[in-house]
Structures are given as structure tokens and as C-alpha cells.
Image (cartoon, grey):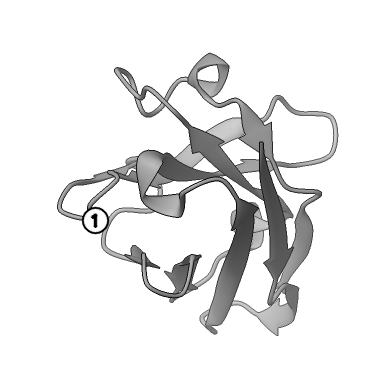
């Protein structure tokens, strides 16, 4: 079992920045790949970004490349998502997730554990 708790969401104007954090507890943090997904009202939950167990590999959705950066600290059991140049279409609930075997990091089905989510709202 892995417990995930997100923080750092909020309201920001377009062009602004937010930093999300996800704190993990439970089993060995470095055993899991980690990802961020988001879900806007009336839409499916979609992949945003993922990072490998060691942090050496990252994967980004095209819509956030060049604007978002994921990082993880296996000594502190945390994963962060730095979001810059935010757009109104980035408005969603953002979820942190952990996958024990991430053959396809962008696939929601790969993730076994999920946090409760944190709201990000970008005003125009």
C-alpha cells in the first residue's frame, strides 16, 4: 500500500505558476513510478506527466511540454510538479498516482494508488 497526499493547488491568473507536491507514505517510495493526471469537469481523467522510479526518465503530455516539470525526491518521498505559464485549459483537479510496473506511463490503468486530488483553477 502507498498513501498519496497532494498539496499546492489554488487559483492563479493565466500566465502564472503553481507548484504541486505529493507526499507518499507506506511501502518503499522508490519502488514506484509516479505520475500526475488531471480531470476537468465533464471530461475524462487525462495523463499529464510521469517520472520513473529513479527520476531519470520523464514523460510529458504534449499539452504541457515546455511548461510543466516533474521531479521526485526519493529521500523525502515526494514528487513535485512545477507548472509555469498556466492557461485556463489547465484548470482541473490534479491527481498524484503511483504505479508498481509502468510499462506505459501515460496509461491510467497502470497506476495502482491514487491521491485525493488538488484543485487548480486558472483564470483568464
Left or right of 96: which side holds 121? right
Instruction: List the residue tagged with mark 1.
Output: 55
Q: What percent of the width, then of the height, locates residue 91? A: 70, 57
Question: Of all residues shown, which one is farthest toward the left?
Answer: 56
Instruction: Compare residues 74 and 117 and report the one nearer the observer.
Output: 74
Residue reaching furthest front? 27
Residue at position x 73%, y 47% from top? 115
**Which class describes the residues within 10 Å of circle 1: few (<14), some (14-19), or many (20+)?**
some
The quarter of the rendered structure image containing the N terminus is top right
Is residue 55 toward the left or the right of residue 27 in the image? left
- Apparent side of residue 108 relative to residue 114 in the rendered image (left or right): left
Residue 32: image location, x then y, percent:
41, 40
Residue at image x 54%, y 84%?
A: 16
Q: How many marks?
A: 1
Q: Quadrant of residue 31?
A: top left
Quarter of the image containing the C terminus? bottom right
- Above or below, 107 against 86 in this view is above
Tell me what residue is drawn at x 65 percent, y 62 percent. Answer: 88
Between residues 49 and 88, which one lies in front from this camera angle?
A: 49
Secondary structure at badge 1 equals: loop
Above/below status of 60 relative to 88 = above
Counting from the top left corner in percent of width and height, residue 27 is at 55, 45
Q: Is residue 10 above or below residue 47?
A: below
Q: Position of residue 122 (x, y in %)?
A: 70, 70
Residue at point 75%, 42% (across, down): 40
Amino acid at each position: 500500500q502507498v498513501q498519496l497526499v497532494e498539496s499546492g493547488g489554488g487559483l492563479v491568473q493565466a500566465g502564472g505558476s503553481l507548484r504541486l507536491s505529493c507526499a507518499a507514505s507506506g511501502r518503499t517510495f522508490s519502488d514506484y513510478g509516479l505520475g500526475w493526471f488531471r480531470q476537468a469537469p465533464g471530461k475524462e481523467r487525462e495523463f499529464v506527466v510521469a517520472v520513473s522510479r529513479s527520476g531519470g526518465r520523464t514523460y510529458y503530455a504534449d499539452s504541457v511540454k515546455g511548461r510543466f516539470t516533474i521531479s521526485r525526491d526519493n529521500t523525502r518521498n515526494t514528487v513535485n510538479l512545477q507548472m509555469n505559464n498556466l492557461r485556463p485549459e489547465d484548470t482541473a483537479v490534479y491527481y498524484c498516482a503511483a504505479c508498481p510496473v509502468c510499462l506505459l506511463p501515460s496509461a491510467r490503468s497502470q497506476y495502482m494508488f491514487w491521491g485525493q486530488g488538488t484543485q487548480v483553477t486558472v483564470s483568464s
